[in-house]
Amino acid sequence: MKLTIVSGREVDEMLDSTDGVTGLINAIATAFRDYSSGKVRMPQRTVIHLDNDWWGGVMPCGARNLGFSVKIVNVIESNKVRGLPTTQGIVVLMDDITGQPMAVINGTVLTAWRTAAATAVSIKYLAQSTDNLAIIGAGLQARYHVLLLSRAFPIRRILIYSRTREKVVELAKLAQGRGGIDAVATDSSHDAIRQADVVITATTSREPIIHGSWLHEGMHIVSIGAPEVDARELDDDVLRRASVIVVDSRIAVMNETGDVIIPMKNGLISEKNLIEIGEIISGVRNGRSRDMDITLFKSVGIAVEDLAAASYIYGLVKSRNIGITVEI
């Protein structure tokens, strides 16, 4: 039994190009479409807590002609003081026909790239302008959003806010080196949001960090944080003002994030208000209908994204003959 080991550095080298990013975005868009069309077998992830540490446990997913993958992932907040990523994991990719294991891929880096690609898919189908991009948060996910989105869209300016000023400065320098993008550190999330066409919240906050009263017509909001049932990045007014609420998976968001669970319990929204991005891609449902619409994409990250990203990365690995192959 032979297995290819793919490092995070190798994933970065393969994906950080216009072609690499374009291929990944297309792979994630196809995965969303196939998931909403019922072509993917994907149970809800198992989540457990070890003290205050979040373990996404096992995230399996299978689809014919794409493969079968399993991701083990965690969010360890205390890693901030250790100088380690708060999100870590591995992804195992297997052949869906023969059942043979094919690769083990650095799941921390894969997750960061595929999450940014999912954001890009939502921007492609829902946003009307990418001139001014606001990123709230300056951690690993924010970094990879800058890397991918600067390759995918003609961004003129990125507005960045985080409570950790040093990380804001680092992220601004990264953005400025990506094709001359004007990167601006703001004094508050409100300052960033009010100037933006697209807003991305990539935080570990448990309380809303974006308020509906700050929004303006025509903007697109992407929320990838608040992965727990009692955590929120968005206040109720954001949901009230959104013309469409788009999600990666209805089942996932209704069971995993307080941004949807709490408003549903309070009767503000119901399942019928949630549109899957895959339904928009396939043309089953509509997204933005007017220039003045405020659109929202709430993503918790689902296993089909990992499968699509792993399969795409593995194809690049084989074509370029990289990675380390071991016999087990």
Image: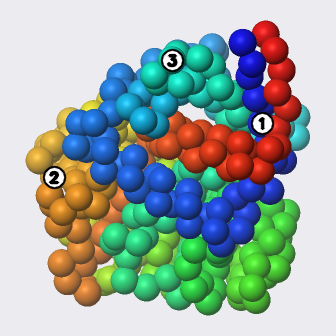
Closer to the camera in the image, 43 or 195: 43
Q: Residue at x 76, y 79 (%)?
A: 178
Residue 294 visible in the snapshot = yes
The vertical placement of 265 against 97, above or below, is below
Q: Which residue is mark 3?
A: 98
| Residue 86 in view of the camera | no
Residue 74: horizontal and vertical position, in percent? 64, 27
Residue 304 vs 53, above or below: the answer is below
- Image quadrant where residue 155 sits: bottom right
Mark 3 neighbour class, 10 Å CA radius: few under 14, some 14 to 19, many 20 or more: few
Q: Can you tell which of label 2 and label 3 is closer to the viewer? A: 3
Q: Secondary structure at mark 2?
A: helix
Front-most of 19 and 190? Answer: 19
Q: Is residue 238 left or right of residue 102?
A: left
Give the SS element for disc 3: loop
Q: Are marks 2 and 3 in contact (CB under 8 Å)?
A: no
**Label 2 to label 3: alpha-carbon separation:** 41 Å
Give the Cα distance between marks 1 and 2.
40 Å
Whether the residues at callouts 1 and 3 have beta carbons within 8 Å, the answer is: no
In-image side of 306 versus 278 (left or right): right
Whole-number angstrom distance, CA of label 1 to CA of label 3: 21 Å
Circle 2 is placed at which residue position? 273
Image quadrant occupied by the C terminus? top right
